Image (spheres, grey):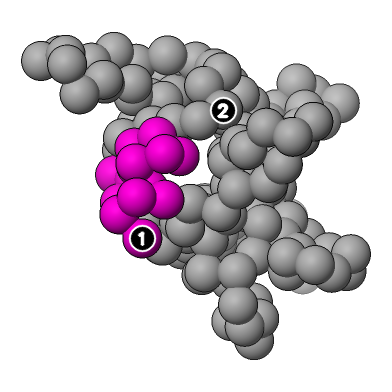
Amino acid sequence: MTLRERERLEGESGFTLLELIISITLVAIIVLIVAGAASLGYRSFNSGERKLNALERLRSSLTILDAQVQSGVPLTLEDGGVKQYYFVGEQESLKFSTNYSIWGGQRGYVIVNYRVERDDKGKRTLFASEYKVGMETQKETKLLEGFDEITFDYFRQDATEEEGEWITQWVDEEMMPTKIRLNLVRGRSAFSYIMPVRVGGTIGEIEESD
């Protein structure tokens, strides 16, 4: 083999190796691009699914709370010989009597208690528990979680007043609020949901109407 032929073969071998390196590099780049797109799509899908589940949970929880509030009944108890409603309204808790049970199988009136608790990260979770009047067995479930704020407000309006006011604590033991407002805050988003209280008035008025 002549020197010229050897140089020609070496040149062809070098060009083929360069092509191979370029091809491998291009394939690697394409694989990385496809993998990145697939990962982004997977994350987007999971994020969308989580948002959808959160919205569905919020809708279901509001439906339960609204049904229980609007199905409220003016049950009273005696404390020191004084009659008062079961209703207790605080900024981060709410207790009242209703004939609508979360678990559905309960018959008769139940006492429901909503309370807000904070986790290790400072996020709020809304729990609901209930028990049947005259029984000690209590059931509990978690309704909402991951919120920065979960609070209740109560609308007070006397019969002699044209305008009422929203307050953060209900202290009147012989009267019910006319509306209850649930306030939710998550990040920059704030949302309020108002529920009318169908049964109201003072204890004396309720007893006379019965």
The percent position of residue 1, horizontal first and vertical second, equals 77, 69
Which residue is found at the position 44% from the left and 31% from the top? Answer: 175
The magenta-colored residue range is 196-210
Say what secondary structure mark 2 lies in. Answer: loop
- Location of mark 1 (residue): 210
**Label 2 CA crowd tier, 10 Å (few <14, some 14–19, many 20+):** some
Residue 6, quarter of picture? bottom right
The percent position of residue 201, horizontal first and vertical second, equals 34, 37
The nearer-to-camera label among 2 and 1 is 1
- Let me know if residue 204 is in the magenta part: yes
Q: Looking at the image, tell me whether mark 2 or mark 1 is earlier in sequence order.
A: 2
The three-letter amino acid code for the residue at tag 1 is: Asp
Which residue is found at the position 84% from the left and 69% from the top? Answer: 135
- Location of mark 2 (residue): 173
The three-letter amino acid code for the residue at tag 2 is: Glu
Outermost residue on the bottom side: it is 105
Which of 55 and 27 lies nearest the eye of the viewer? 55
The percent position of residue 113, horizontal first and vertical second, equals 68, 47
Residue 163, quarter of picture? top left
Assess whether mark 1 and mark 2 are in contact (beta carbons under 8 angstroms).
no
